[in-house]
Each structure stands twice: as structure tokens, then as C-alpha cells.
Amino acid sequence: MVNQVPEFMQAITISEPGGPEVLQMAQVLTPKPAPGEILVKVAAAGVNRPDCLQRAGHYPPPKGASQLPGLEIAGEIVALGEGVENAALGAVVCGLVSGGGYAQYCLARPEHCLPVPQCLPMAQAAAIPETLFTVWHNVFERGAACDGEVLLVHGGTSGIGTMAIGLCNLFGITVIATCGSDAKCAAAKEAGADHVINYRDADFVEAVRDLTGGEGANVILDMVAGDYTQRNLDCLAIEGRLVTIAGLGGAKATINVLKLMMKRQTLTGSTLRARTNTFKAALADEIAREVWPLVEDGHLRPVMDQEFPLAEASAAHARMEAGEHIGKIVLTMA
């Protein structure tokens, strides 16, 4: 350990499962990096919906992970665990973590981190890893999206939605986004969506068919599931891929398998937090090659909603659960 790392740190703890009010600032022991780990002095941490699920008692951390919430961070490496050779003290990184991001210091694995360009503010750096890793894997790997195709993304103004829009803009993919208000539709359009659908005013299935000349979307990124599943399949193209990454509308769905067979559609999905370190390292390596140059040259930036100081984590969660945010919510340590 290096001298500037204190024995104790400030962190947000979950006093008991419940609403945003159960998030409390506490003094806890600063973690020490195990072999293969690094310790990051956190400048900012992204807020994500899985954090809210964990707080409510519905998404426990994987075995061995920190019990503190927070899945993405940006900051300075201040200590190296035994055997770490691919990281340097003082380097500024952002990365995906299995937990512990809502704190002044957080453990990470260097192979899950990416270097923060000097031109990128730390709050923006902290807003990238979770959404970028999720979108790249689910849209471009599992969904096999390629230039000239059409992506339908639900929740177009969420952190995931805005990242999907930004990435697809850069890779020649037409984006249709659904949103729940005219204001959010306008925000999704400003973020780069080619077409927007207010799902409260229009049937997105019919709208997607109209926008694609009856062909349907080639890839759908869905966070709703439930009764959206068959509706998604109904506006998915022949050979289309439906990728589900959350179940906000319910964990169970009934589908017409014969329709799926006739159109040769693929129904898949994934979660990221519980994947192995090896998988996340391979994903980070691919992102470093294929996407990170677009961050370094300024072409890819997260859409930012609001920054909260660490002590106001409960207010950040309340804003996320109110559903009014556009883009990413971030906690800062300053």
C-alpha cells in the first residue's frame, strides 16, 4: 500500500433493503487490493438501475464482491495488488467493478479498466463503463448489429438507450427509439436517434413496421420484457435478433413460437455483473480496440443528466426511480 491511502474511508452503505432513504454515509475500512487487483481513489461513480435493485434487496452482489453499491468508477490508481504488472500507480482509469463504487476508494481489476483521456471529464468517464460494456456486448456481439441495419431501443433516453444511440450513429446503424413523453422523444432525437416513438401515443409495433417499410427492425435492445416480448418479435425482421437485458415489465413472457420459427428470429439476453473476470477482460480488450479510439478523439461521449455529491446518493436514486432523467446520473467525491 502507498502512504496516502487512509485506513478508513467514506462510503455509502445499505442499512436495510428499502427505498432511497436506506442509503447512508458511513466510515468503513478502506479495502486492500488482493493479488491481481488495484485500488482506485474514486473521483466519480456512475449510478445504474441495478444499484437501485441491489438497494431494494432484489440484486445481491456476486460471491466475493463488495456489499457496497456501485458498478462503474473513474479515478486514480493508488495501490497495486501482488502480481499486477499491467497497471501503474498514478494512472487515471475508468472501469467496470462488481461493487463498491459508491466510496472514496474502490477495488478493481486492471484488465477491466480503460485509460481516461485528458480531454474527458472524470464524471463523464465514470458514466461510460457499465453502459458501454453492456451495449457493445448485447447490440454488437450478441445482437450482431452491422452497418445498414436498423436497431430498435426501448428507453431511448436512459443511460443504456443514449449509449446505444451514440454507438450506432458511429457504426452506420439506423436507430429507432421509444420514449414515454414528447420531451423525451425530443431528447432522444437530439442524442442522435433517427426516429422516435412516443409509446404512450402510438403502438410501437405498427410504428416500427411503418418506419421500415414493413421489414421490421434487425435488432431490438429491450429492458422491459414481460408482454413487450411478443410485441418485439412482431416488429422484428426476418432473421432479426431480440436481446433482452432487463425485466422491468416482468420476468415471464408468452410468445408465439411458430411465428419465431417462420421468421427465423433469435431471442437472447444477458446480464453482465456475474460474468467471469476472464469474460469481462476479453470484452474490455475488444472495446479498447474497436471503440475506445472514438472516446479518445471525442466522437463518443455519454449523455449526462445530473451529478450528485456522494452524500446525496439517496437523491440520485430517487431521481433515477422517478424516471425523469435523460442520460447518466453520476456521484462525485469532490
Image: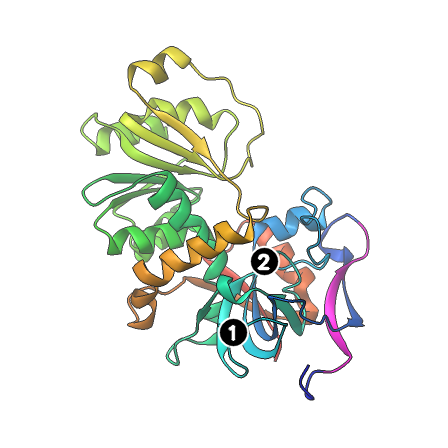
**Secondary structure type for disc 1:** loop
Image quadrant where residue 170 sits: bottom left
Q: Compared to 116, does 51 lie above or below?
A: above
Residue under the image location 49 percent in, 53 percent down:
280
* Location of mark 1 (residue): 85
Q: Earlier in the sequence, mark 1 or mark 2?
A: 2
Disc 2 marks a residue whose amino acid type is Leu
For the residue pair 254 and 81, the one nearer the viewer reads as 81
> Crowding at label 1, few (<14), some or many (≥20) Cα neighbours within 10 Å?
few
Residue mark closest to the camera, 1 vs 2: 1
Question: Is residue 113 placed above or below 237 in the rendered structure?
Answer: below
- Label 1 sits on what residue type? Glu
Taking depth in this image into account, of 279 and 136 the one nearest to the observer is 279
Q: Residue at x 50, y 17 (%)?
A: 254
Residue 151 appears in the figure: yes
Q: Which residue is mark 2?
A: 71
Q: Where residue 287 sits in the image (x, y, percent)? A: 37, 58
41 in the magenta segment = no
Q: Which contiguous range is marked in magenta? A: 6-16
Q: How is the image coloured?
A: rainbow
Q: Which SS does the magenta portion mostly show?
A: strand
Residue 77 x %, y %: 56, 77
